[in-house]
Amino acid sequence: MIGKVVIFGRDAAAWLSANALQTALGSTGLTVEVVELPSLLQAQDIYPALPALEAFHGQMRIDEHALLKAIGGSYSLGQSFVDFGPVPFFHAYGSHGVAIDRLPFFQHFIRARQKGLTVALEDFSLTAAGAKIGRFIVPDSTTLSFARADYGYHLPAVAYVDYLRGMAIRAGIKVTTVRGIEVERDDEGGIAALVAGGQRMTGDLFIDASGAEARLMRELGAGFDTWRGWFRGDRVLVAASPAFASVPPHARIEALDHGWQGLYAAQDRTRLLQFYDSRLMSDDAALQVAARTSGLKLGDAVVSELNPGRRVQAWSHNCVAIGEAACVFDPIDSPGLHAIQNGLVHLLALFPRDASNRAERIEYNHLMQQGFERTRDFQIVHSLLCAHAGSYWRAPEAALPDTLAHKLETFRARGIVPKYDGEAFPLDSWEAVLTGYGLVPESHDPLAEATSDVELMAHLKRMLGYIREQVQSMNAHDAYLELFCRQG
């Protein structure tokens, strides 16, 4: 039987792993121990989170309002993209329109555009409409009867990790703080123990949560596949400025000559993240550009390396890599916490009974590869279709993955996005981003013709009217934070 899991690492990957395992398997007698490395986080770091994190928090019995109040976090209804497409567009965390005559809305939208409709797709999103005027949508029976309205978060990273660490300690999880370790191998090539300061920490299963360093996976010889041919960036600048007077419920992403810049507002501060190619711009120049383009008074700027790619195996021998130890993403679509969550969900579903974990390991690696590559495909779209004239946005050097090429070809032909296993982003996200980049499908489902032009336009008019009414009745994001989540 697997009696003990040793988590080696730091920050969100380590503490989400500890709490998820303790919550799910602690009652079975499983012992969880964290061998903690010094944090790499700075006060200016932030974790933007996708909507799926809400349910994951719920499984760990984290109260959403209490969390945001404790750490000064805020909600996010999506991302506003500037200078990426022909016009600015919004990637909403929610759906667009409602089915008409049992046919998906997007097929009718394509037909309406061909008939001369000039209203943007995002205007049929309750989530986008609310976000753009600072309103916050609490999904309820009324909104769900019309559309899916989701939300993510902007989580100040240091405070979030402290919150998770406190949870783990209160749950009785043992913590050993180290600055480095030696890895003791077993006869089968796996990990027998971690050794530090005269202590020998043994376990049946190990989790590598050491970030891009991937200390344990490197020890086990797990190779790394770089994605630099699709993503030119290799440097991340993070900085912070005072909080906005009004906290917008979305991120703002802007294309720049040398990369891109994101603004992520929270209650305590506003964070800036800039991802760029060091071959095009020095770190000092990047900071100057960040201050000029954002118009903010920036402080505490820090630059670090970031090289997108994935481990060939996320589970090697008796060690599972979680988070950046398994895969490093371009941060543009906020996939970091989602990748941690996805790894833990699959690990819990395949948690081995004993050391004979070959079948579970093979399936886990298959599932994680699918998930990593589907997220990669979604992100390549930015590199491929961005209309910005900057040299950073030249077409990717590597050939398109077959999966993405097929998606784009099918979308251009019929407005359909084929779905593969392991998708991190729903169909609505693909439609929002591809449409935002100006891709216009050549045709639509013939069944859309069963709805007359007059009926179609009447349906669309009613949808827009409903969205206007609902948005006006919503709380402002600031008011919602004040009611339930205001820090201090």
Image (cartoon, rainbow, N blue to C red):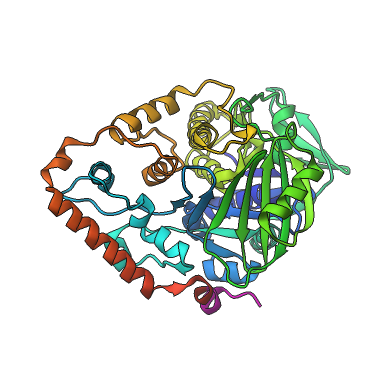
Can residue 172 be seen here?
A: no
Residue at 36% across, 75% down: 473
Q: Is residue 130 magenta?
A: no
Q: Is residue 123 above or below residue 83?
A: below
What is the x, y in percent for residue 382? 52, 37
Residue at 44% across, 28% down: 404
Q: Give the quarter of the figure containing the N terminus.
A: top right
Residue 264, quarter of the rendered image: bottom right
Question: Closer to the camera, 115 or 27?
Answer: 115
What is the x, y in percent for residue 468? 33, 67
Tell me if 297 is positioned left or right of 430 in this view.
Answer: right
Tell me if 204 is positioned left or right of 181 in this view.
Answer: left
Q: Is residue 149 above or below residue 325?
A: below
Secondary structure, magenta segment, majority class: helix
Q: Give the quarter of the figure containing the C terminus.
A: bottom right
Question: Closer to the camera, 428 or 337?
Answer: 428
Residue 422, quarter of the rendered image: top left
What is the x, y in percent for residue 181? 82, 39
Residue projecting furthest to the top = 399
Question: Closer to the camera, 290 or 366?
Answer: 290
Residue at 57% across, 21% down: 398
Question: Closer to the camera, 458 or 432?
Answer: 458
Residue projecting furthest to the right = 197
Residue at 81% across, 45% down: 284
Q: How many marks?
A: 0
Tell me if 293 is positioned left or right of 253 in this view.
Answer: right
Can residue 434 be seen here?
A: yes
Q: Is residue 410 above or below residue 275?
A: above
Q: Is residue 319 above or below residue 261?
A: above
Which range of residues does the magenta coloring cover? 481-488
What is the x, y in percent for residue 138? 41, 67
